[in-house]
Image (cartoon, rainbow, N blue to C red):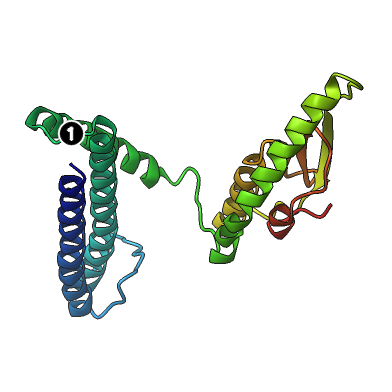
Amino acid sequence: MVNNVHALFDALENLLFACIRYAKAGQQSLCLSAGQPLMYKPVLSRKQNFWSIQRAACWVGTSWTIRIAMWLFYWAASFGIWLLLVNTTKAHELWMAAIAATFAATAAEIVRAQRLAPFRPKLSWLAEAWREPWYIVEGCASIFYAFIKHFFRPEPSVLRNVVFDPGGDDPASAARRALAVAFTTMPPNFVVLGIDIEHRVMLVHQVSESETPTMTRKLGARS
């Protein structure tokens, strides 16, 4: 079973990269023949000439190349997750996986194309995840200690504001805020209720008060 799943993933991965290479080859030939860079945003008017039409086609080709590649990626991921959940490669499950993956990939690409939540993190921000195991262990110990102490001397939980640099409306700042919320909330002793951009604070709930994690400070916390 495991070997079959691995073979299936390898086949899907090869198909995805083959489609991307094929699309890029066609895209490059079209763009180079027009004498324009690959990423070009045309401004079309009634007086557009032959070259502006080719530039527009180049841009549209670039957009559709990305959309097709992302759709195939979502489809392959959804298909593989379905098979891992059902733990079988029988024919009816393969058909069901293909149908479900088609719906999932289409919905995911429609949402992604709207750019409702741009996300452009830096690698150093993602690397802060290596601190999570320690903070999870420490958070479990804090919760257990607070639970035992509650029988002898009950103490209320803590709701506090942490000074936070939210950045702006750019995709990088949005990614940093999202990672700060996700990474900080993962340990059981921290629940981030939200980030107030206007007042530049992060609202945090804790069962037992402790200092702000290093990974949160690296992502914008100031206290």
171 relative to 58 in the view: left or right? right
Q: What amino acid is labelled 1 in the image? A: Thr
| Numbered disc 1: secondary structure | loop
Residue 60 visible within the image: yes
Q: Nearer the viewer, residue 77 or 64?
A: 77
Does residue 206 show up? no
Whether residue 216 sits left or right of residue 106 in the image: it is right
Q: Quadrant of residue 82?
A: top left
Task: Say if 135 sits above or below 41 in the image.
Answer: above
Which quarter of the figure has residue 95?
top left
Report the label total: 1
Query: In which quadrant of the rendered image does the N terminus lie?
Result: top left
Left or right, 127 with reference to 103: right
Residue under pointer 1: 88
In the current view of this chain or complex, which residue is farthest to the top? 151
| Residue 216 horizontal/vertical position (percent) | 71, 52
Q: In the image as oriented, which residue stretches furthest toward the left? A: 91
Residue at the image point whose x is 10% and y is 32% from the top: 90
Position of residue 211 relative to residue 141, above or below, is below
Q: Which residue is at the front of the view, 138 or 168? A: 138
Residue 53's spot in the image, x, y percent?
Answer: 21, 66
Instruction: Give neighbour class at mark 1: few <14, some 14-19, many 20+ (Cα, 10 Å).
Output: some
